[in-house]
Amino acid sequence: MSQWFDVVTTMITSILIARWLGPDRVGQMAFCFGLIGLFMMITTLGFAQAHLKRVAEGMPLEQCIGAYGAIVFVLNGFALLAVLAAWSILMRTLQAPSELTAFVLFLAYVMIQNFSQVFIQTFEGKQEAAKIALCTISSKCVRLVAVTGMLCWKRSLTSVAIAFICEAGAQMGMAIRLLPRLPSPIRVSRKVLISYWEYAKPVLILTPVSTLMDTVDRVILGVSFSSAQLGYYSIARNMYEAFKSIPSAVLTVLAPRLATEFSAGDRAILRQTFRQTFRKMMLIMTPVTVVSMALAPLVIRSVYGPTYLPAAKAAAAFFFVGWVVAALIPFQYLLLASERHKLLLKINPVTVAVYLGTLWGVGHWHGSLTAASLAQLALWLIPAVPVYWAVKDLTGIGFPQQIFRITVGGLAMAACFVPVRAPQLSPYWALAVVLPAGVIYLLLIRVLKEGTKEDLKAFWKSIHLGDVWRYARSETAGTSNPRETTEFGKL
């Protein structure tokens, strides 16, 4: 539920910023975040995954928090030094004084968020979904109120940056408030630091490169595209980030559970957990993807305004990428849980080279927003085959047979929208097709064997407010294990 609340509030703030600032300043904001991502790569050296795994394995919390907090402090310090070293270049790149001020404030926002992740990822490692939800909900409420208030006061990038800092501060405060009482003070343990280093060492390059791939598009395209074009791309990308939160809600719980079950050594339970979760996720992701692609022009026209219609095709392309990611990323999570992630280091140079080359070619020769969106596929398709076979050899886990039937249902659903895509027809016709297309999808997936009804029931439980509330109360009170005493926790 918190993931959906995050999606709604993030989209509302994105709409406010887009409507009140316009495509040019939205593009400038995207370029600032792209540059910040280049400097903050150094703060993502694989220690976050190490922290999540060590907490899931049951290491003392006070030592884990102390070790990871010290690591985050040092790495953010190095990132700040890198910014100061490149200050003269930044002044030439961000020529407007307001843009440079916004860059500094956005950088502060990202750093505060990095420190709050020390506590939030502790909750993830302990599979305390309610605490993560409270941090998300409180911070996003603050962001919505702050962005609205600051833009009413002054419509500028600086105002947006100040509002974002308020959000990060609220997230940090709530995370500290929800931290459980520890048996001893937080301290830095040399032994725990060494264990973090042993886990993170193979991915020292892999994780920063992942951060680079997540931000470099806005820098490369920002050099070639106009500010308005980058603004359109940024809107499509924002919709993609909101879309990705649907599988992220599942993966937030799946990652530590896979790590725990892999450490326990019971491969049968590991395979069962993976397959059931994967099937449930794709059963929902497929129709959501089809509907999102079909309604992208209507949503952008109605919500962001006709000015942003050039972003519609790029958004639809991003939604397709999101579906592919949802199908492939669980295998990477399983590979990380097995600590066989060294394989990704061998694949990464090729992935990086192809992705950067594709982005550069799109920016300098093609200039298409849709092509820029589809370039993201390189990040997932290139490593997909070796990762899949490595996981299959290690655990015996492959694609469940139902995924192919779910895909056929999705294609049939997509075919329903083809007749209403004619340019002379109103985009509102797509709304009329959603219900019959959904019925066709549900009828087709009935060919699935056992599990379909159970999957739909599980989805209903995941959004049932009463079950979610009982889970949250049980977890935050600490009186019992909510994963055993509530229906939502048993999912």
Image: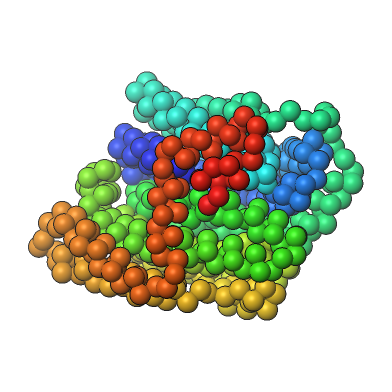
Placement of 149 over or under 96, stated as above or below: above
Tell me the colour scheme of the image. rainbow
**Is residue 74 rendered to the left or right of residue 434?**
right
Residue 95 in the image, given as x and y percentages of width and height: 49, 39
Placement of 439 over or under 462, stated as above or below: below
Q: Residue furthest top?
A: 153
Tell me what residue is drawn at x 43 percent, y 37 percent: 466
**Is residue 200 rendered to the left or right of residue 121?**
right
Placement of 13 over or under 417, stated as above or below: above
Residue 403 in the image, given as x and y percentages of width and height: 44, 72
Q: Quadrant of residue 69?
A: top right
**Is residue 326 rendered to the left or right of residue 46?**
left
Q: Quadrant of the N terminus?
A: top left
Tell me what residue is drawn at x 52 percent, y 61 percent: 277
Camera-side residue: 450 or 319? 450
Camera-side residue: 21 or 186? 186
Residue 377 in the image, given as x and y percentages of width and height: 48, 68
Residue 395 seen in this snapshot: yes
Camera-side residue: 455 or 433? 455
Placement of 189 over or under 415, stated as above or below: above
Q: Residue furthest left?
A: 424
Residue 71 in the image, given as x and y percentages of width and height: 77, 42
Residue 35 seen in this snapshot: no
